[in-house]
Image (cartoon, rainbow, N blue to C red):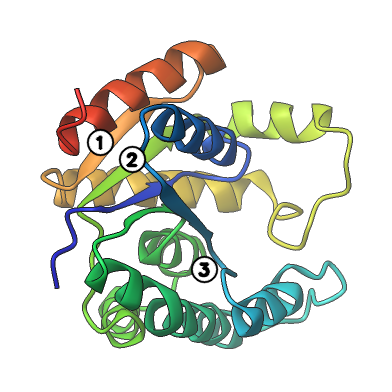
């Protein structure tokens, strides 16, 4: 399966990732490119139902093993219902999170065995890997400040202690180092406009749209 037209975005909560994904979709549209935006967990009717369970703040008792299996179930449905057929048709795809989130959050954050996490990721995705992954990197302290000023209720994951996010950020840094050929790290503390411009430049170069 040719994955060239599949790009994912990663980062800890409140890194600005979802904002940048939407801006990129708009920039591609202006260039005449229709790119599908898929989010995780979610993107299909079944996966969105799983998302409701995962992010419900009342589900604080959820065990890490149950958590990773639910994320993987949502991902498997998304991959086989949407991603693989779209790629087979030559569509452009932007994913707001993919399996690297599971490695960072459930592997590094929850402390689950990384070899098991990798095997489960491979099983859920049938081995599908993004062509490139943009990591928006900010400190957990900056993320906490943004979370506090967001003025909305946090979901179950967003309510975790800052120490959890320190482990996740460390995990993302390790992933970016281990898979340097796929990861593109973008400092996330700059202005929205400057970050969007850099991402647009990189994506247009990757997809030969310049």
Q: Is residue 79 above or below residue 26?
A: below
Q: Position of residue 133 (x, y in %)?
A: 29, 47
Of labels 1 and 3, the one closer to you: 1
Mark 1: secondary structure:
strand
Q: Are marks 1 and 3 in contact (CB under 8 Å)?
A: no
Q: Earlier in the sequence, mark 2 or mark 1?
A: 2
- Residue 134, label in figure: 2
Residue 106, above or below 200:
below
Residue behind mark 1: 184
Q: Residue at x 72, y 27 (%)?
A: 145
Q: For the residues labelled 2 and 1, say whether their Cβ atoms are less than 8 Å apart.
A: yes
The quarter of the rendered structure image containing the C terminus is: top left
Q: Which residue is mark 3?
A: 110
* Callout 3–callout 2 Cβ contact below 8 Å: no
Q: Earlier in the sequence, mark 1 or mark 3?
A: 3
Mark-to-mark CA distance, 2 and 1: 5 Å
């Amino acid at each position: 399966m040719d994955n060239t037209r599949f790009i994912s975005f990663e980062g800890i909560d409140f890194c600005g990732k979802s904002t940048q994904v939407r801006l990129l979709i708009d920039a591609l549209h202006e260039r005449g490119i229709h790119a599908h935006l898929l989010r995780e967990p979610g993107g299909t009717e079944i996966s969105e139902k799983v998302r409701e369970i995962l992010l419900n703040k009342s589900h604080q008792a959820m065990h890490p093993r149950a958590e990773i299996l639910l994320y993987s179930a949502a991902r498997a449905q998304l991959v086989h219902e949407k991603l693989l057929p779209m790629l087979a048709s030559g569509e452009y795809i932007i994913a707001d999170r993919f399996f690297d989130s599971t490695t960072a959050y459930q592997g590094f954050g929850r402390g689950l065995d990384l070899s098991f996490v990798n095997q489960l990721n491979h099983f859920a995705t049938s081995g599908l890997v993004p062509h490139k992954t943009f990591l928006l990197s900010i400190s957990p302290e900056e993320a906490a400040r943004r979370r506090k000023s967001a003025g909305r209720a946090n979901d179950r994951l967003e309510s975790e202690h800052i120490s959890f996010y320190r482990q996740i950020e460390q995990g993302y840094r390790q992933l970016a180092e281990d898979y340097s050929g796929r990861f593109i790290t973008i400092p996330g503390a700059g202005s929205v406009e400057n970050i969007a411009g850099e991402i647009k430049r990189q994506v247009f170069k990757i997809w030969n749209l310049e």
